[in-house]
Image (cartoon, coloured by chain):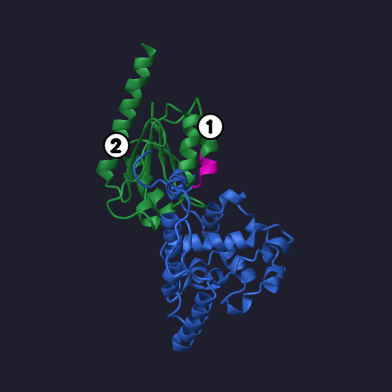
Chain colours: A green, B blue
């Protein structure tokens, strides 16, 4: 079965780039350009992985969405890869200062720009972890 | 889903929190432009900006000073017959143009916003003497003298402090900000 990935990011150029990288690696990718549409799409269908942006709309809307996902019993188990350009987009995060990770239980945070190889490694690692976790629960 | 997103859609996404803010409902009546107190400082009136966004003239919109001249009085939003929150659209355009790093040269707005936000996040309140350098040099020597006179007057009357004042519970305030914006280690 094809692995389905959802991507929520408001930057269409970035989305186009990442999407083509993932599609070349045989993932099927669905895209939403704002958190509201994204959350609806996540509820309508099952996805194996979510790629999430943080700075959308009025500010750090991705954080709010991640918290919503953490509370949702159905979506809680879905691994989330946060890809963010937050360091460039907000003026008060200084070089070397850490970005707060772990908005959801099963997540990972990388900063833009992302190397294609690094992204694919992260994606497959997260999918593998989720798979292992699932099989453990079934045992 | 298509990957090509029009400028209209991009702006709608930036404003999705106000339910997409229906700029497509604009009937070009010009009430916003007629109401605007800052319209004489703008390259394009708000009505024209909405028209340009809908027609996809991205470069023209981002090159204009309209949204940076907006005084956020919200009179246009109140009077719009189509229910468009035009002041919020101006904020969306500011955010968008700062995000993309594409705005007119020599504007006070972007620099001012940046130092203002930095200041509020770090200290919890604004301190004019630190903010002033972002704008006092923009209006030539005459403007500088005028600003200095105003500042001296304010200080003599005790209306402007010489040293920044600390707010109560700064640590709590910073923790609150960190709930909204992910800076630093998890608490």
Q: Is residue B34 above or below residue A119?
A: below
Task: Give residue A20's quadrant in the image.
Answer: top left
Please tell me which residue lies in front, A115 or B147: B147
Going 38% across and 15% down the picture, which residue do you hit?
A: A137
User: What residue does disc 1 label?
Assistant: A43
| Tag of residue A10 | none
- Which residue carries the number 2 mark? A122
Q: In the image, is B37 to the left or to the right of B124?
A: right
Residue A122 appears at what percent x and percent y?
A: 29, 37
Crowd tier of the residue under label 2, counting other residues whose Cα lies within 10 Å: few below 14, some 14–19, many 20 or above? some
Secondary-structure class at tag 1? helix
Q: Which secondary structure, mark 2?
A: helix
Q: Which quadrant of the figure contains the N terminus of chain A?
A: top left
2 and 1 marks on the same chain: yes
Q: Position of residue B97 (x, y in %)?
A: 46, 64
Q: Earlier in the sequence, mark 2 or mark 1?
A: 1
Residue A124 position within the rendered picture, expressed as x and y whole percent measured from the top left: 30, 32
B102 over B184 or under it: above or below: below
Q: Is residue A102 left or right of residue A56?
A: left
Question: Does residue A22 lie above or below A130 as drawn?
Answer: below
Range of residues picked out in magenta: A33-38
Residue A69 position, x and y percent, is: 48, 33
Q: Is A69 one of the magenta-colored residues?
A: no
Q: Main secondary structure of the magenta part?
A: helix
Identify the residue shown where x is 53% and y is 79%.
B153
**Chain identifier of the residue bearing label 2 in the image:** A
Above or below, B115 relative to A93:
below
Q: Is residue B137 left or right of residue B154?
A: left
Chain under numbered label 1: A
Label 1 crowd (10 A; few <14 / some 14-19 / many >=20): few
């Amino acid at each position: 079965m094809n692995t389905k990935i959802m991507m929520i990011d408001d930057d269409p150029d970035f989305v186009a780039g990442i999407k083509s990288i993932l599609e070349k690696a045989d993932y099927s990718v669905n895209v939403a350009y704002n958190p509201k549409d994204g959350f609806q799409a996540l509820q309508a269908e099952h996805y194996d992985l979510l790629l999430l942006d943080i700075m959308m709309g009025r500010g750090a809307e991705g954080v709010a969405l991640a918290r919503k996902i953490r509370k949702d019993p159905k979506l809680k188990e879905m691994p989330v890869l946060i890809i963010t350009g937050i360091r460039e987009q907000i003026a008060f995060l200084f070089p070397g200062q850490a970005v707060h990770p772990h908005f959801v239980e099963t997540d990972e945070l990388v900063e833009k720009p992302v190397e294609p190889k690094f992204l694919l490694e992260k994606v497959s690692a997260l999918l593998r972890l989720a798979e292992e976790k699932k099989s453990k629960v079934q045992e | 889903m298509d990957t090509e997103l029009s400028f209209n859609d991009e702006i709608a996404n930036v404003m999705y929190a106000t339910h997409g803010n229906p700029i497509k409902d604009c009937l070009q009546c010009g009430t916003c432009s007629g109401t605007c107190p800052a319209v004489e400082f703008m390259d394009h009136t708000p009505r024209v900006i909405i028209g340009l966004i809908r027609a996809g003239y991205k470069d023209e919109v981002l090159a204009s000073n309209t949204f940076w001249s907006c005084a956020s009085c919200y009179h246009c939003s109140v009077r719009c017959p189509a229910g468009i929150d035009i002041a919020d659209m101006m904020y969306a355009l500011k955010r968008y143009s700062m995000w993309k790093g594409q705005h007119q040269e020599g504007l006070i707005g972007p620099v001012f916003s940046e130092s203002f936000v930095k200041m509020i996040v770090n200290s919890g309140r604004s301190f004019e003497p630190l903010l002033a350098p972002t704008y006092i040099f923009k209006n030539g020597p005459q403007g500088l003298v005028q600003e200095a006179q105003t500042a001296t007057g304010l200080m003599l009357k005790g209306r402007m402090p010489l040293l920044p004042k600390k707010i109560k519970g700064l640590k709590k305030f910073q923790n609150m900000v960190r709930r909204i914006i992910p800076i630093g280690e998890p608490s």
